Amino acid sequence: MRDPHTVALHGHVDIGQSLIIHNPQPVEHKTTSFSLRIADSRLRAEIKDDPPTVTDAFRALMRYLRSWEILTNLRYGSEAIRCVVDDAEVINGPPGAGLSDELRRCLAPDGQITLGIAGPQARRLYPDLPSGFVASPDVVSMWERYAGYLAGREPLLSMAYFCLTVIEASTGKRKKEGREAAAERYGVEFDVLSELGKLTSGRGDASAARKVVAGSALQPLSDTEAAWVNEVVKALIHRVGEWAADPNVQWPQITMGDFPRL
């Protein structure tokens, strides 16, 4: 008997209370690694059935769903959709055969990918599938910290400073050279990163400030400044995902004029 291998994954899409979707049309996406279809709240992803490529195809699918999760959350906010991968089609195996241990290691914890949208919002379509956006390791790490801030697990300033240092470190340079290189790589006006650095380094109250500067009193962010930092972080995460999808694209520059006036 040939070795069993997975040819498709099945799951379902749960719609939360903050989102109303009226009889959405099916959505489909195909790549060289997998084909995905979502219809009637059911998910089916067919992956390449050539055994040597199954794990790579599976990982590509998980990364795509993760990209969908992050991009959707950046656009709409808190959780309202949950996509759960819970079954597999296996051929050449005994009855009831499921995912191999190697494929299970590719899954998110509990086999779940969560997607979120703020609401309530009424729609007739599922949220757009990702195009030109990839959940690279940097995107995921920035998003996880941002999600922690949204959930109240972390102050705004420490989260934002972390995200700033991620994009600076991604250039392989340090301090000012890293910030300048990040501005050039990701198409961001240097003043945006400079202002983000100033606000996240020396501002905040005793519960939120990243550090205390000798001779200076703690000064919390104003509501306007906090809103500015929040919007800048979201824009940076999105841009890093765009860069991961295609580093050679010339995007419109992210400038100070794109955000609330300070």
Image (cartoon, grey):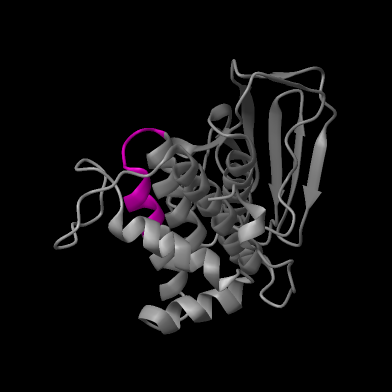
Q: Is residue 231 visible?
A: yes
| Residue 220, percent from left and from top | 31, 43
71, above or below 55, in the image: above
Q: Which residues are magenta?
A: 151-161
- Left or right, 35 with respect to 241, comes to right
- Left or right, 141 with respect to 30, comes to left
136, above or below 181, in the image: above
- In the orientation shown, which residue stands out farthest toward the left? 214
Residue in the picture at 59% in, 54% down: 235
Q: Nearer the viewer, residue 111 or 157?
A: 157
163, above or below 35, in the image: below
Q: Nearer the viewer, residue 58 or 197?
A: 197
| Residue 142, percent from left and from top | 45, 55
Q: Is residue 1 visible?
A: no
| Residue 164, percent from left and from top | 43, 63
Residue in the picture at 14% in, 63% down: 214
**Quadrant of residue 175 within the rendered picture:** bottom left
The answer to whether residue 221 is magenta is: no
Q: Nearer the viewer, residue 72 or 108?
A: 72
**Quadrant of residue 76 within the rendered picture:** top right
- Left or right, 41 with respect to 3, comes to right
- Left or right, 16 with respect to 138, comes to right
Residue in the picture at 31% in, 42% down: 154
| Residue 252, percent from left and from top | 74, 66
Query: What is the number of callouts on the image?
Result: 0
Q: Nearer the viewer, residue 254 or 58?
A: 254
